[in-house]
Every structure is written in structure tokens, then in C-alpha cells.
């Protein structure tokens, strides 16, 4: 199973079966942006060969990429309400950590600009230059 929600170099989405090589040939791939450009292949090294999508099979027969539109998805979860509550708490904590990191990254330590004479001249050299001309 392959799930990518954040990395930019690899495709974002859910991949099942196949191998993660240069071409990322998953048996079934559901892209992040929606259910319109899903891909399926007739065989892979993980599962028994067989058709997953007649629409994708027809596209391959016509020489097109094996894409199809997913019309419905059924998602199952295990663990009940207690597990859902723990997951929601963990998600809220992770979001708070991310927000705190963003706030910390946005703050500028102004005292760091005055650490050395070079920094003062490089970054603030012209800042106070107009003060002595009588304006």
C-alpha cells in the first residue's frame, strides 16, 4: 500500500499493489485530486491477475492510458467510537504542533541582526544613513 499526501516529487494519492519503481506501476491508483483519473492495471506482482475496471481495459485496448472514473467508494474502519475519538485527538494535536511551528518560523529575531558588525552593515547599512542630513 502507498499513501502520499504531502511529498511533491511523488504522485499524491493512494496506490495498491504493484511495485514502487521509476514508473510507480500500481495495480490500482486513486489520485489525490479526485476520482476522475484513477488508473488500474490487469496484473501486478502483488495480486492475482484480473480486470479491475472495464473502462480502463477498453482504454488500454485503444492505446490510451489505463484511466477510469471511480463512481463510488466504500470505506471501512475498525475500532469503534473510542478509536475515532483518539484519532481526532491525535489529529488536533498534530495540527496544533504544525501551527506552532509555522508561528515560530514567522517570527524574526531582530536582535540577531545586530550580532556582528558585518550583519549590521550588510542588512542595516542604509537604514540609519539619512539621520544626519538634517531632513
Image (tube, rainbow, N blue to C red):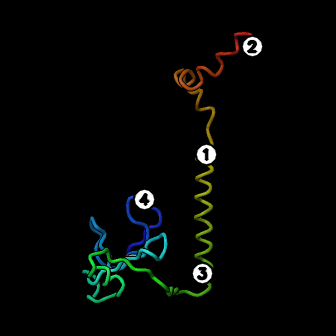
Give me the C-alpha separation between circle 1 and circle 3.
33 Å
**Upstream in the sequence, badge 1 or badge 3?**
3
Q: Is residue 126 above or below residue 89?
A: above
* Residue at disc 3, secondary structure: helix
Q: Is residue 104 visible?
A: yes
Residue 49 in the image: above or below residue 39: below
Between marks 1 and 3 in the image, the one whose residue lies nearer the viewer: 1
Mark 4 and mark 1 lie on one chain; the one further toward the N terminus is 4
Q: Which mark is residue 135?
A: 2
Q: Is residue 30 above or below residue 71?
A: above
Q: Secondary structure at mark 2?
A: loop
What residue occupies the far top of the structure in this picture?
133
Query: Which residue sits at x=31%, y=74%?
Result: 65
- Closer to the chain start, of discs 2 and 3, is 3
Q: CA distance from mark 4 to mark 1?
A: 23 Å
Q: Is residue 16 visible?
A: no
Mark-to-mark CA distance, 2 and 1 = 34 Å
What residue would you read off at disc 3?
84
Which residue is found at the position 38% from the left and 59% from the top?
9
Residue 23: quadrant of the picture: bottom left
- Labels 4 and 2: the sequence-earlier one: 4
**Residue tagged 4:** 8
Q: Are marks 4 and 2 in contact (CB under 8 Å)?
A: no
Q: Extreme right residue here? A: 135
N-terminal of the pair, mark 4 or mark 3, is 4
- Residue occupied by mark 1: 106
Amino acid at each position: 500500500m502507498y499513501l502520499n499526501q504531502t511529498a511533491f516529487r511523488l504522485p499524491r494519492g493512494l496506490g495498491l499493489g504493484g511495485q514502487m519503481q521509476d514508473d510507480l506501476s500500481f495495480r490500482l491508483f486513486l489520485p489525490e485530486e479526485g476520482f476522475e483519473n484513477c488508473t488500474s492495471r490487469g496484473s501486478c506482482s502483488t495480486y492475482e491477475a484480473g480486470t479491475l475496471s472495464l473502462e480502463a481495459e477498453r482504454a488500454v485496448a485503444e492505446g490510451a492510458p489505463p484511466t477510469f472514473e471511480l463512481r463510488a467508494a466504500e470505506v471501512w474502519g475498525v475500532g469503534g467510537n473510542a478509536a475515532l475519538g483518539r484519532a481526532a485527538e491525535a489529529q488536533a494535536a498534530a495540527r496544533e504542533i504544525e501551527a506552532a511551528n509555522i508561528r515560530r518560523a514567522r517570527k524574526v529575531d531582530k536582535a540577531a541582526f545586530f550580532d556582528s558588525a558585518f550583519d549590521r552593515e550588510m542588512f542595516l547599512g542604509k537604514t540609519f544613513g539619512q539621520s544626519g542630513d538634517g531632513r
